[in-house]
Amino acid sequence: MLRLPMPFAPRLWCALFALLVLPAPLLVQAAPAPWYYWRSLVDGQRVCAQTSPGPGWEQDSAPHEGPGCQPRRKVLVVPMR
C-alpha cells in the first residue's frame, strides 16, 4: 500500500474536495439558453437564434422558452375517474 507523507495527505483531500464538490452548484443551475428573434439593421430580415448572428443585428423579441422560437407547449392534465 502506498503511504503518503503526513503533510501531503491533507492537501490531497482539500484538492479533491475543491475539484469534486465546489463546482456542483454550477452544474445544478445549468439551463438551455432562450431563443430570440434578431432583426438585421441592413435589410430588416428576421432570424431566430439563441445568440446574436453577429454585428449588424439587434434583438427583436422577448425570450422564447421553446426551441426555435416556438412557444412552450401547454399540457392539459385531465384526472381519471
Image: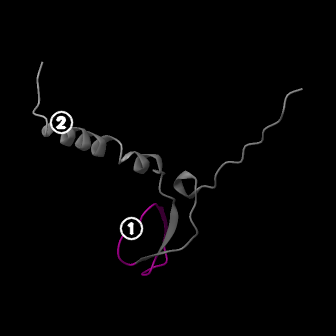
Q: Which mark is residue 74?
A: none
User: Residue extending furthest right?
Assistant: 81
Counting from the top left corner in percent of width and height, residue 46 is at 50, 70
Secondary structure that dominates the magenta span: loop
Q: Is residue 70 magenta?
A: no
| Residue depicted at x 82% and y 36% | 78
Quarter in which the N terminus is drawn: top left
61 vs 1, left or right, is: right
Residue under circle 2? Answer: 9
User: Residue at horizontal 45%, vertical 50%?
Assistant: 30
| Left or right: residue 63 compared with residue 9 | right
Which of 31 and 67 lies nearest the eye of the viewer? Answer: 31
Q: Which residue position holds label 1?
A: 53
Identify the secondary structure beneath mark 2: helix
Contact between labelled residues 1 and 2, with CB atoms less than 8 Å apart:
no
Residue furthest out toward the front? 6
Query: Which residue is the extreme one toward the bottom?
Result: 42
Of 27 and 52, nearer the camera is 27
Picture layout, residue 73 above or below residue 49: above
